[in-house]
Amino acid sequence: MRVALPRSLNGYLLLGIGVITVPLLAAILHATIEMRRLTVFSQQLVNESVRTTELIQDMFEERNTLGQKAQVYAVLGGNQDLASFDKSDAALRATMKELRSLLRDPAARDAVDAFSILQQDIVGVVRAAAGHGERRAGPDFGPLDDQASRVSRHANAQKDMELASLGDQTTAARRELFWESSLLIPLALAATLSFALGIGRPIRQVDRAITELGKGNFSGEISVSGPVDLQRLGQQLEWLRGRLVDLAQERNRFLRHMSHELKTPLANIREGTELLMDGAVGELRPGQREVTAILQENSIKLQRMIENLLSYSAWQSNSVGLDPSEFRLRPVVKQVLENQQLTLVSQRVRLDVKIEDVTLFADRGKLRLILENLLSNAIKYSPRGGTIFIRGRADGLELVVEVADSGAGIPVAERPRLFEPFHTGRAPGGHVRGTGIGLSVVNEFVQVHRGTIEIVDGEFRGAHFRIRMPLRAEIAPELAAAAPASVPRRKANAA
């Protein structure tokens, strides 16, 4: 038979509570009934045992009293003595009647009946003597005493037997409750595990979806299975993902449009400053040339910032997957240094470059932008006459790239937000504050290559970035077919 699972989260919870609590309540109810039964039985047994003991004591006392009254009547023979004897006889008969009602063992009851017959015989002897007006010696109470002892033994044997029965019942009840608990615990664990998996899986899907949204990854469609409530939550998250994608596209369109709008007047400014520097409108005096050089330098920096905005926007528009190819690291570094040559000369910054001739399979364009942004950041924060260190080497199956400067370093307080988009640190004196996307682009491109970037302390005086990424990038399955089968290699000689 197929059991239909509930469609809502509340239904899952109610069913789970029912599956777990119903057997538990049944076990508790059964245990309560058993404990109550054993308690009543033990209380009844104690009361009967106490009363039986009291009646046995009364039997011996009243038998002694009856013997004494018989002896007195045998000596004196008065009517008053006979009445006293009859009273003792009636009390002993009542005691034996009550005692017989408490004794359930047939042998014990037979002993009581035999005692009563002997008592009747003794009473008959006394009354027969009273009817003839004779005075005789008192009757023999020896057999009655022996029978009283047998009654006492049988009564004690019954108590022992009932106590043993109570112990057996207690042991049986304890064993039964133990097996019920042994069966209930696995059942409860199985039910808990079943419902935890039934609810845990969609909750993990929701958690992964929220994590991806928090990381800014909007590429994957959000789908949540399970109860209707969690499916509805997944639909809301999918709607939120769509809204975030729309906002990101609007932001990228805004960046592209603004960047293009800024490039035209900036190009005019650069052309004007270059004409001034070339003396197209006349020879410049030293002071004028210095001001014009400042304008030219900052216009170059503004152009680089706009290009970073365009690069960031383009990457945001097409951030899924890589465009991998096999290439050597040295030519890429050389190209980056040539592009930054003018700024390096103007800042009088020296370079300390050691690049191994590593061949890797990765996205050449993204790696070039990584190096350009790290180098631009190092130039920006290096003092005039400082040194920038660039290292590149293979470490097993990983590429290790390091860029360090001789500036003031990165304050510890700024490091947690250093790679966030549009976060700008304190710009050094004489420099235009950046857009705050350079290191964000670096971090995103490194992550696309399944690599890591870290800030290293102690090796160089200034900021020191170390990147580790696979020599052979792990790409999406649809791009894997296009990847060459050759294994990356490297040469040991340094640049």
Image: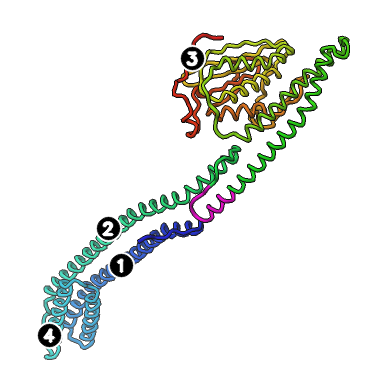
Q: Amino acid at mark 1?
A: Phe
Magenta span main SS: helix
Q: Amino acid at mark 2?
A: Thr
The residue that label 3 is drawn on is: 490
Please give the label number shown on residue 261. none
Residue visible at 41% across and 57% down?
20
Return the x and y of residue 307 as percentages of the image width and height. Answer: 70, 26
Q: Earlier in the sequence, mark 2 or mark 4?
A: 4
Pointer 1 and pointer 2: residues touching (CB < 8 Å)?
no
Gap between marks 2 and 4 measured at Cα: 62 Å
Quadrant hosting residue 219: top right
Q: Earlier in the sequence, mark 3 or mark 1?
A: 1
Gap between marks 1 and 4 measured at Cα: 53 Å
Gap between marks 4 and 3 measured at Cα: 140 Å
Magenta-span inclusion, residue 85 = no
- Which stretch is magenta? 223-237
Local SS, label 4: loop
Return the x and y of residue 12 as percentages of the image width and height. Answer: 47, 57
Q: Earlier in the sequence, mark 1 or mark 2?
A: 1
Point out the residue furthest to the front here. Answer: 280
Gap between marks 3 and 1 measured at Cα: 90 Å
Gap between marks 3 and 2 measured at Cα: 79 Å
Please give the label number shown on residue 41. 1
